[in-house]
Amino acid sequence: MNISDSSQGFTLIETVIALFVLAVGLFSAAGVATTVIHGNAIGREITTATTLAKDKMEELTYKNAVNGNDSIQSFFTRTWQVAADTPAPDMKTIDVTVTFPWKNSMKTVALRKIEAK
């Protein structure tokens, strides 16, 4: 029986290096996935806050616009301020601000419109 000097298959060091490269790739993918999940979560909260501000903005008109605030779902705080005769007579500037907590800080979404008489 002839035994050939050229071996078939992979050596142990080649297998270890391949496993190391695979592990680095998998851990990198897991890190990216975590970042994407956190980005989606803050994006959802910002979208909700923007929608709440937009809803209040649509509700406030020149005739019924007065200062106020409310709380939604015990998480979002919505505040609106009305400045009369700004920027010109017979106009009101209406600012709606929605704040919410995110990772030990407060995030804010603010909208502004000018309503004419």
Image (cartoon, helix red, strand yellow):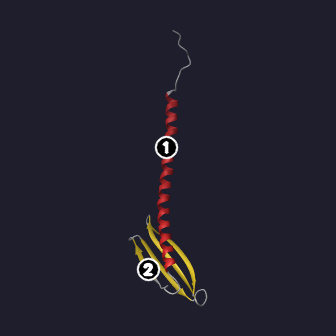
Residues 54 and 112: in front is 54
Q: Read off the residue under disc 1.
A: 26
Does residue 11 sit above or below 69 in this rendering? above
Name the quadrant of the C terminus: bottom right
The tag earlier along the polypeptide, 1 or 2, is: 1
Q: Where is residue 57 in the image (x, y as percent from the top left)?
A: 51, 77
Residue 99 position, x and y percent, is 46, 72
Q: Name the residue under label 2.
A: 69
Vertical arrangement, residue 80 with respect to residue 24, above or below: below
Query: Distance of mark 1 from mark 2, alpha carbons?
Result: 48 Å
* Image coords of residue 27 (percent x, y): 48, 45
Foreground of the two, 37 or 61: 61
Q: Which amino acid does label 1 sit on?
A: Leu
Name the kind of residue labelled 2 in the image. Asn
Residue located 48% across and 48% down the image: 30
Residue at horizontal 50 percent and vertical 31 percent from the top: 15
